[in-house]
């Protein structure tokens, strides 16, 4: 693990995307193998639900990666730690909890 919280965050997002992509492929393969009818077969409905769940998690992991990369870029250009919405400094505690936070705690609410 890296000591840099933003790099660690990006790596965690990448690892999670890799794991979820594998999971998504497995669910898709399972749905093909079962040849199930999504709407009428109960097993098909379960697989369709699983596929949606994994797709949603994958979407969240990709957002997490985007946020981490944006934060790394902001650190390079010196705007890291500044709220994108109101321009105030993002609290140190919030950055410790969420290194890739784009907004201050007030704007996040
Ligand atoms: Zn703000």
Image (cartoon, rainbow, N blue to C red):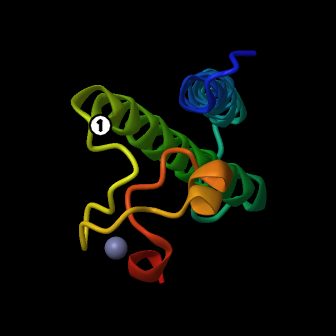
In this picture, residue 77 sits left or right of residue 11: left
Q: Report whether the residue tagged 1 is closer than 8 Å to ligand 1.
A: no
**Residue toward you, 99 or 87:** 87
Q: Can you say whether 102 is above or below 63 in the image? A: below
Regarding mark 1 in the picture, which secondary structure is present there? helix
Q: Quadrant of residue 93?
A: bottom right
Give the mark count: 1
Q: Can you say whether 17 is above or below 44 in the image? A: above
Q: Quadrant of residue 61?
A: top right
Residue 76 spot, x, y in % from top left: 29, 26
Image quadrant in which the N terminus is located: top right
**Residue toward you, 83 or 10:** 83
Q: Give the crowd class for mark 1: few <14, some 14-19, many >=20 residues within 10 Å.
A: some
Residue with the mark numbered 1:
74
Q: Can you say whether 46 is above or below 51 in the image? A: below
Residue beneath the point at 60% across and 48% down: 57
Residue 62 spot, x, y in % from top left: 46, 38
Residue beneath the point at 38% across and 38% down: 71
Q: Quadrant of ligand 1?
A: bottom left
Residue 51 spot, x, y in % from top left: 61, 47
**In this view, which residue lies farthest toward the top?**
1
Q: Quadrant of residue 45?
A: bottom right
Q: Can you say whether 1 is above or below 99 in the image? A: above
Residue beneath the point at 77% across and 53% down: 43
Residue 18 spot, x, y in % from top left: 61, 21
């Amino acid at each position: 693990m890296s000591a840099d919280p933003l790099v660690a965050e990006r790596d965690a997002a990448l690892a999670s995307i890799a794991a979820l992509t594998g999971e998504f492929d497995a669910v898709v393969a399972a749905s093909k193998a079962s040849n199930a009818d999504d709407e009428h077969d109960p097993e098909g409905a379960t697989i369709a639900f699983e596929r949606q769940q994994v797709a949603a998690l994958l979407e969240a992991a990709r957002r997490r990666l985007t946020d981490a990369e944006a934060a790394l870029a902001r650190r390079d250009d010196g705007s890291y730690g500044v709220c994108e919405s109101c321009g105030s400094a993002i609290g140190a505690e919030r950055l410790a909890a969420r290194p890739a936070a784009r907004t201050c705690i007030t704007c996040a609410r």
